[in-house]
Image (spheres, rainbow, N blue to C red):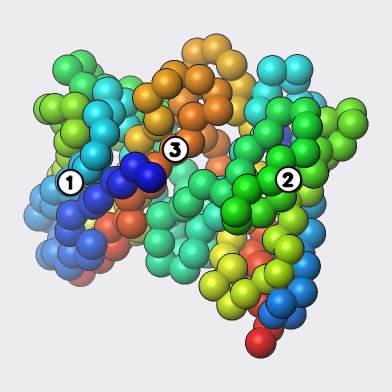
Amino acid sequence: DAKTTQPNSMESNEEEPVHLPCNHSTISGTDYIHWYRQLPSQGPEYVIHGLTSNVNNRMASLAIAEDRKSSTLILHRATLRDAAVYYCILRRSGGSNYKLTFGKGTLLTVNP
Amino acid sequence: GAVVSQHPSWVICKSGTSVKIECRSLDFQATTMFWYRQFPKQSLMLMATSNEGSKATYEQGVEKDKFLINHASLTLSTLTVTSAHPEDSSFYICSAPGTSGSLTDTQYFGPGTRLTVL
């Protein structure tokens, strides 16, 4: 599976926007970019996914670079409940395409 | 959205005993479920893929005789940690994919089970 690289940790202030970067320079044409987050002592939860175009949903926005070698998860107004580990994951077609391989993710701290 | 539950949410057992963890898809059917293990301050590590009606597929390095997986129905998968030892203490999480079979499927995760082996 193609690998993703994320910063180990980031910090934000409450009610400010947060931009979480992810590099995936070996991404292939059919790889979807998925983001999940894991709140403390809980299972992960889906945040957003995309292929080429930028995506918005009620939780966040996903900005995908034109060459698709990087993407950015945007939380428009961080709240204390957004403090979590955020995982950027590529899903490759073929074989076990249901599998999710988790990297180390980015630990987001939100300051009040 | 779809809900996946796990039971128990936490368990403490003595070394040498076996522990069973259940994973249920509450409002959808799941022919495939996944089991992950997560040690403190680390990421999730996929242990095995549970397949309804057939044998589980284990990731490299995971002992199939120690971590028994049974997927007896379309809504239930169980993970039994046999002869548990303190090094098996971990956070065990299951998940089930959406049912459309496409790459856009969301995976639904259970809340996790905290196992402590004394």
Q: Horizontal and vertical percent for residue B86?
A: 27, 61
Q: Look at the numbered disc 1 and give the secondary structure of its residue.
A: strand
Can residue A44 be seen here? The reply is: yes
Residue at image coords 70%, 61%: A75
Q: Horizontal and vertical percent for residue A65?
A: 87, 37
Q: Look at the numbered disc 3 and give the secondary structure of its residue.
A: strand
In the displayed structure, would residue A101 be above or below residue B84? above
User: Looking at the rendered structure, which numbered label has been put on residue B22?
Assistant: 1
Q: Look at the numbered disc 2 and give the secondary structure of its residue.
A: strand
Q: Are the residues flagged by discs 2 and 3 in contact, CB closer than 8 Å?
A: no
Q: Chain of mark 1?
A: B
Q: Is residue A24 left or right of residue B43?
A: right
| Type of the residue with mark 1 | Glu
Q: Horizontal and vertical percent for residue A47?
A: 57, 49
Residue at image coords 59%, 60%: A85
Nearest-to-viewer mark from 1 and 2: 2
In the displayed structure, would residue B106 be above or below residue A22? above
Mark 1 and mark 2: Cα distance apart in space: 34 Å
Q: Horizontal and vertical percent for residue B56?
A: 27, 24
Q: Residues within 10 Å of mark 2 (few under 14, many from 20)?
A: many
| Type of the residue with mark 2 | Leu
User: Looking at the rendered structure, which numbered label has been put on residue A62?
Assistant: 2
Q: According to the image, label 3 marks what residue?
A: B107
Q: Residue furthest top?
A: A94
In the displayed structure, would residue B77 be above or below residue B109? above
The foreground one among A46 and B11 is A46
Q: Chain of mark 3?
A: B
- Circles 1 and 3 on the same chain: yes
Q: Residues within 10 Å of mark 1 (few under 14, many from 20)?
A: some
| Type of the residue with mark 3 | Gln
